[in-house]
Image (spheres, grey):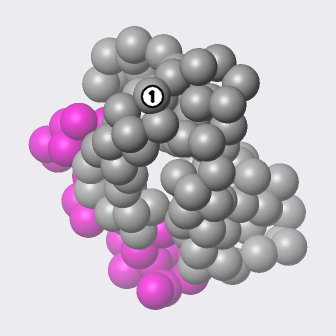
Amino acid sequence: MHSAASAASMWLPVVMDLTPAQICQVKMVDYAISFARTVAGVHYPTDNIAGLNLGQEILARKLPRYLANNFGGDIRDIRRKVSSLRFDWSDFLDDPICFPSGSSSSSTTSSSTGRYGYGYSS
């Protein structure tokens, strides 16, 4: 799925009124899809993070016009919402909403598993 995995975590919060907990769940699905590529041995964790960020960038550029043209939304409002939802996937495991205190990546991964928790250091 490559960077397409970041699709849900960008467009669902734009078109739906999700709670912060629901947004975290959508992000976890995208992250899990990319993580599976490392488990399968086809990507390094840093490749996955780069792909997730790339997918988010593409959607951030394309989604506002698509929604405005197909559903009649105000493109400026859509762009503002998209902008407010952007984040860096490199920081996802440290998100205090998705990973409350005591469960962040920095406290749960050992030095042998690396920053992303699956055997590689970054």
Image location (x, y in percent) of residue 91 = 33, 63
Image location (x, y in percent) of residue 77 = 36, 33
Which sits in the foreground, 75 or 62?
Answer: 75
In the image, residue 64 above or below residue 105: above
In the image, residue 110 above or below residue 86: below
Q: Is residue 117 left or right of residue 38?
A: left
Residue extent of the magenta highlight:
96-122
Q: Quadrant of residue 36?
A: bottom right
In the image, residue 32 above or below residue 92: above
Which sits in the foreground, 59 or 39?
Answer: 59
Q: Quadrant of residue 88?
A: bottom left
Picture residue at 46% right of the left edge, 86% below the top:
122
Picture residue at 41% right of the left edge, 74% below the top:
115
* Residue 28 appears anywhere in the view: no
Number of numbered discs overlaid on the protein picture? 1
Picture residue at 53% right of the left edge, 52% below the top:
60
Image location (x, y in percent) of residue 89 = 44, 61
Q: Secondary structure at mark 1?
A: loop
Picture residue at 48% right of the left edge, 15% below the top:
16
- The amino acid pointed to by label 1 is Asp
* Residue 60 appears anywhere in the view: yes
Image location (x, y in percent) of residue 109 = 37, 64
